[in-house]
Image (cartoon, rainbow, N blue to C red):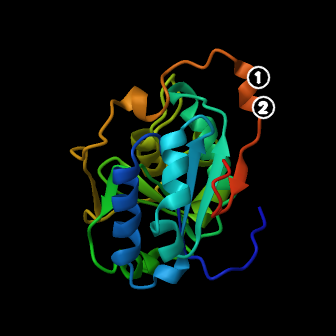
Amino acid sequence: MKYARTNINFSFVLASRNRPLHLKHSISCIYDNAQFPDNVEILIRFDDDNQLSLDFYKTDDIFRKYKNIRVFVGPRLGWAHNRTIYTRLCTMTKGDFIFHWADDNYMFKKDWDAFLLQFKGQTAVIGYRSRCVITRQAYDKYQYIRECGMGHIVGGFLYDAQIKRCAARDQIYIGIEKLWHTKKNMKDTTRMDGAYGGWVLNDLSLLDVPDREITIVTSADSI
């Protein structure tokens, strides 16, 4: 795979639904704790029927405060097809490292990016317990990483813990200290199925509808 040379070292990919408070805090923790925040990108995917998240995107200053936040919109696919969403987002990343992320994940270690840069250029899956960050070399080399979407997968697909086991088998797993944690006690906490738009997708043709990237709009027009 060929990627354009950029100054992006770290790419975070996540889907979010109906949890703007979680999402805002998660974004802030990533950038505010980075030593080189301009070298971090976040790719976020919203469902096109999720007006709460779309309104948050249009009106909240966080999307203007930080550089390199890209937002995509597509049909509501639900939890069972989360794999499709994350796999697509990963193909659009530019970083030397790819984080599968969630809106209730929070980076708490100061200068986390400077710490991880020691692994740049290695073929490695780096993680604490089940959570992983993937180097570009590992993403390019291993099909099981690219095709599973890197986490939170149901319906028999691979997920974070299985990537860790496969990486350990291939002798590319590196265990590190804890850099991030999960927080689920904010006012917009939802059940797992609610956060991802339910479990089942009745219209499978929606899987063929591509996501589209959107930009900040200042008018009252809908996105």
Q: Please rate how many residues cluster around mark 2, counting C-alpha atoms within 10 Å: few if below 14, some from 14 to 19, many from 20.
A: few
The picture places residue 184, in percent across and down from the top left corner, at 25, 44
Q: Are marks 2 and 1 in contact (CB under 8 Å)?
A: yes
Quadrant assignment, res 6 = bottom right
Q: Residue at x 54, y 40 (%)?
A: 51
Instruction: Identify the amino acid type marked 2.
Output: Asp
Q: Residue at x 54, y 37 (%)?
A: 50
Of 54 and 125, nearer the camera is 54
Local SS, label 1: helix
Query: Extreme left residue here?
Result: 185
Q: Residue at x 72, y 79 (%)?
A: 5
Tell me how many marks there are: 2
Of 136 and 25, nearer the camera is 25
Q: Is residue 204 left or right of residue 52?
A: right
Query: Extreme top residue here?
Result: 202
Local SS, label 2: helix
Of 90 and 103, nearer the camera is 103
In the picture of the structure, the residue carrying the numbered disc 2 is 208
In the picture of the structure, the residue carrying the numbered disc 1 is 205
The picture places residue 103, in percent across and down from the top left corner, at 40, 50
Is residue 18 in view? yes
Instruction: Identify the amino acid type marked 1.
Output: Ser
Q: Is residue 68 left or right of residue 18?
A: right
The picture places residue 29, in percent across and down from the top left corner, at 34, 68
Q: Residue at x 63, y 37 (%)?
A: 84
The picture places residue 147, in percent across and down from the top left corner, at 64, 41
Quarter holding the N terminus is bottom right
